[in-house]
Each structure stands twice: as structure tokens, then as C-alpha cells.
Amino acid sequence: MHRMAPHLKILCAFGFVIAVVITPREAFWAFGIYVAGIVVVASLARLRPTFLITRLVVIVPFVLAAATFPFLEGGVEWHGLSAEGLWDFWNVAAKASLGALGSIMLASTTEAPDIVRGLETLHVPRVLTSIMGFMIRYLDVITGEMARMRIAMRSRGYQPRWLGELGSLGKGVGSLFVRSFERGERVYRAMASRGFTGTMPAEVVAAPTRSMLLGALVVPLAAIAVAAIAIGVS
């Protein structure tokens, strides 16, 4: 998993997500197979269950929003709740969780610059990949600037526990935005003076081996086959 070519892992994750999305919500057995597949791949990649579960927090807002469906939708009721709303809640929660797990496993086994290079290999427009690359590289700069500003604010008596300090926090965020924008301008001028024309130089990517191709095809093809069977049964 860690040594596989980045563009193959991207295709693998994309195919898995597509299969999950098109699976009928009534096919509980299909979702069980998807979970079993994730467990197997996570074991091969040596990813701990706690590592994956803790990162599912990002989908909690969507699941909480979907939890209102049984109370808002009408139709046939089951114990005072909308049956159709319960189905919709299950559909959103299950598919969001599986899709998020696939994305987390991709991000956990692939460095961010490698994901950008994989997208370039898949012929994603260079403008988009260049923006992604700059964002990844510049995120560390902004994070470091934020840490220095926080230390400076605390040394001057800033107490974030009190609502009265929100004004100082707002001024700090505004200052961070201005300083980041100015630094971005300086970085761009430095790159332009060195011959930057709008796109980063293309890197030579080694051709994937046959074993990599076969390993990358197993997961999406199996998931699509399960989804096709579930659609046919339903």
C-alpha cells in the first residue's frame, strides 16, 4: 500500500467510493463486505483501527445533520419516526463513513506531494495541481506564522478563555491574513524572477509494475462487482 504508485491508489480509492455510492441502501450485506475489505486493506497497510476511527470525526457534522431526517420527513412512521427518514439517515451515515475511510487510507499511505503528482499523472489540469502544490507547501508557512503570533499574544497577557479576548483574536487573524498575503506576493515575485511561467516542472514518474496494477485493480473491481450484484438483487 505504501509503495504503490500514487495515481493507482487514487484510482483505487475513487473506484471504491463510486461503488459505495451506487450501492442500494437496502443491501446491508454489501456494506458489510465493504467494511471487511477496508479492514483487510488497513491490516495490510498496518493502520491501527484507532487511527482510522479518530479521523472519522470530520464527518460528524454531516451525520448529525442526517440524524434530523427521521424527524423532518413524513410518510410511513415507525415508533414515531419516519421510516423513509431512517432509511435516508442510514444511507448517508453508511456511505459517508465508508467514503471517508477510503479517503483517510489514501491520505495515510500517500504523502501530500505524491498525491499531487498522482493527479498530474492522471492528467488533471496543471493549473489545479499547481494550486494544490502551492497550498500544501504554504500551509506549513502559515502554521508556523500562527504559532509565533500565538506565543507573542500569550506573552502579552492574551487569555483565550474569556469572551472579552475575541477582539484580540479577530485582530490577530486579520494580521495573519495580511502577512500571509504579503509573503505570498514576495514568493511569487521570487519565483517569477527565476523563470516561473505558471506551471511547475513535470517530474518523471516510474511506470508501475504488473503487481502494482493487479493490486490496485483488486479493490475497485471487487467493490464494483459487489455493487452490481446488489443492484441486480434489489
Image (tube, rainbow, N blue to C red):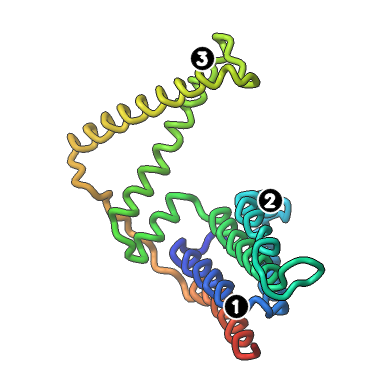
Q: Secondary structure at mark 3?
A: helix
Mark number displayed over residue 23? 1
Measure the alpha-carbon separation of dots 1 and 3: 52 Å
Q: Does residue 37 appear in this view?
A: no
Q: Residue furthest top?
A: 156
Kind of residue at disc 2: Phe
Q: What residue is at 51 percent from the left and 69 percent from the top?
A: 12
Percent of width and height locating residue 110: 52, 55
Q: CA distance from mark 2 to mark 1?
A: 26 Å
Quadrant for the C terminus in the image: bottom right
Q: Nearer the viewer, mark 2 or mark 1?
A: 1
Mark 1 element type = loop
- Residue 166: x %, y % from top left: 54, 22
Q: Nearer the viewer, mark 3 or mark 2?
A: 3
Q: Which mark is residue 152?
A: 3
- The correct choice, above or below, for 77 with respect to 200 in the image is below
Name the residue that disc number 2 marks: 51
Which residue lies at the image location 26% right of the left edge and 31% below the top edge?
185
- The kind of secondary structure element at disc 2 is helix
Residue 206 placement (x, y as % from top left): 39, 63
Query: In which quarter of the view is residue 29 placed?
Result: bottom right
Instruction: Looking at this view, name the residue that lies furthest to the right.
Output: 79
